[in-house]
Image: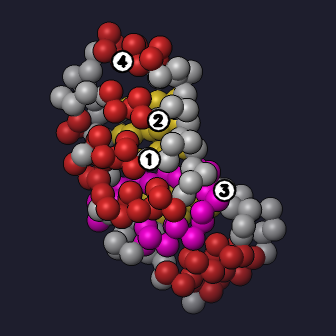
Amino acid sequence: ERNGLLRLGVAALPDLSALTLQVFRLPTETFKSLAHLRPTLRHVAITRCRGPGSIATLGAFSWLRTLKLHNAPEVTAAQLYGLFAQLPALVEFDGQNLPAVKSDFKAFVAAAPRCLRRLRLVLVHDLVSRPLEPLAQLPLLEGLWLSGFPHHSTEQLLPLADSFHLRSL
């Protein structure tokens, strides 16, 4: 019943361009129907994504420009990378508490869309000893926000701003 109300609500808002969902666990068909109703939707924020199938449904929004994905411990690296492959227009990714990022930062960056301009990563404590050079694979990156890199000093991070042409760090 709630899914039907969500569909009706989205259909009733002709200029809807952003959607924020808490405790996201919609059936695949419901979320895909939202994609067909709202081709104007460009920004999606999801907090507490539950269920490994939930993330796959976001691929229906191939024109998505901004994705905020917070607290999604069940999302695997393969699912996240597959989603990136389906979102070629993604220019901003905000990830918080994602084991997929923690497990292999280099693979995460390699899978990220090349048009990514802004990247925000929070709670990535496992990356403290890893180099940030893989970010050079994102040639358009102009904004980088990191939290949970306590062992990277300012002296280590400032050269990133020059070498990657960052406007904000």
Can you tell which quarter of the image residue 13 is in? Answer: bottom right
On screen, residue 58 above or below 106: below
Q: Nearer the viewer, mark 3 or mark 2?
A: 2
Left or right: residue 102 compared with residue 53: left
Q: Name the residue under label 1.
A: 112
Q: In which quarter of the image is the N terminus?
A: bottom right
Amino acid, disc 4: Leu
Q: Name the residue under label 2.
A: 138
Q: Which class describes the residues within 10 Å of circle 4: few (<14), some (14-19), or many (20+)?
A: few
Residue shown at 72% from the left, 67% from the top: 39
Amino acid, disc 3: Arg
Asked if residue 56 is among those painted magenta in the image, a careful observer would answer: yes
Q: Position of residue 127 (x, y in %)?
A: 23, 35
Q: Is mark 4 on a helix, strand or loop?
A: helix
Looking at the image, do the residues carrying marks 1 and 2 touch, with CB atoms under 8 Å apart? yes
Q: Mark 4 points at which residue?
A: 157
